[in-house]
């Protein structure tokens, strides 16, 4: 299989870079399925541990109604707090959540079940004592 140089676009910086025939041969030998998506400079920044870019979203704090930015996309139904309200919430002591009791059989339920069982046994004894055809 013959390879020729191809021009690709970096998804980080948007600049075009050359995916050489030698690199393509290397990718083919290693059985890599996807073409590179980053230029060499951006790849070096990523491997060096450069700062990651986080999307900043402007929103309103659920507590104090102040305009703020958060490093995530808020989801509907969940409160979003500004830095100061978030710090206040962290400093509050957590309230212990009392476990919800799971209802089990009460003493009355156990007694009723025992009486029902005795009544069934008595009925079975009475049915067994009835003479049947031989």
Image (spheres, rainbow, N blue to C red):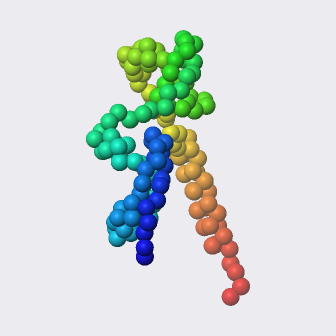
Residues 119 and 26: in front is 26
Q: Nearer the viewer, residue 68 or 50?
A: 50
Q: Quadrant of residue 121?
A: bottom right
- Which image quadrant: the N terminus? bottom left
In the picture shown, does residue 130 fall above or below 121? Answer: below
Q: Position of residue 111 (x, y in %)?
A: 54, 45
> Which of the 4 image quarters holds residue 26?
bottom left
Q: Position of residue 110 (x, y in %)?
A: 53, 46
State the residue at coordinates (37%, 16%). 91
Give me the residue at 43% from left, 13% from top: 84
Residue farthest to the right, as pictured: 133
In the image: residue 42, left or right of residue 114: left
Quarter of the image with the C terminus is bottom right
Looking at the image, the residue that sits furthest to the bottom is 134
Q: Nearer the viewer, residue 109 or 117?
A: 109
In the picture, measured across the screen, residue 134 lies left or right of residue 9, that is: right
Answer above or below: position of 107 versus 65. Answer: below
Q: How many marks?
A: 0
Residue 13 appears left or right of 26: right
Q: Vertically, is 53 above or below 33?
A: above
The residue at the far left in this view is 48
x and y, in percent, of residue 78 in the image? 56, 28
Residue found 35% across the figure and 33% down from its top: 51
Residue 99, visible in the rendered structure:
yes
Asked whether residue 89 appears in the rendered view, the answer is no
Query: Residue at coordinates 63% horizontally, 73% vertically from top-left?
Result: 128
Residue 106 appears at what percent x and percent y?
A: 52, 40
């Amino acid at each position: 299989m013959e390879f020729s140089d191809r021009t690709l676009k970096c998804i980080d910086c948007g600049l075009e870079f050359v995916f050489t025939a030698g690199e393509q041969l290397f990718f083919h030998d290693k059985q890599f399925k996807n073409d590179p998506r980053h230029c060499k400079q951006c790849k070096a920044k990523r491997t060096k541990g450069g700062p990651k870019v986080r999307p900043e979203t402007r929103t309103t704090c659920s507590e104090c109604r102040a305009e703020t930015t958060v490093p995530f996309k808020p989801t509907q139904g969940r409160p979003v707090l500004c830095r100061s309200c978030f710090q206040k919430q962290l400093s509050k002591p957590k309230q212990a959540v009392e476990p919800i009791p799971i209802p089990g059989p009460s003493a009355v339920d156990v007694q009723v079940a025992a009486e029902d069982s005795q009544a069934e046994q008595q009925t079975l004894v009475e049915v067994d004592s009835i003479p049947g055809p031989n």
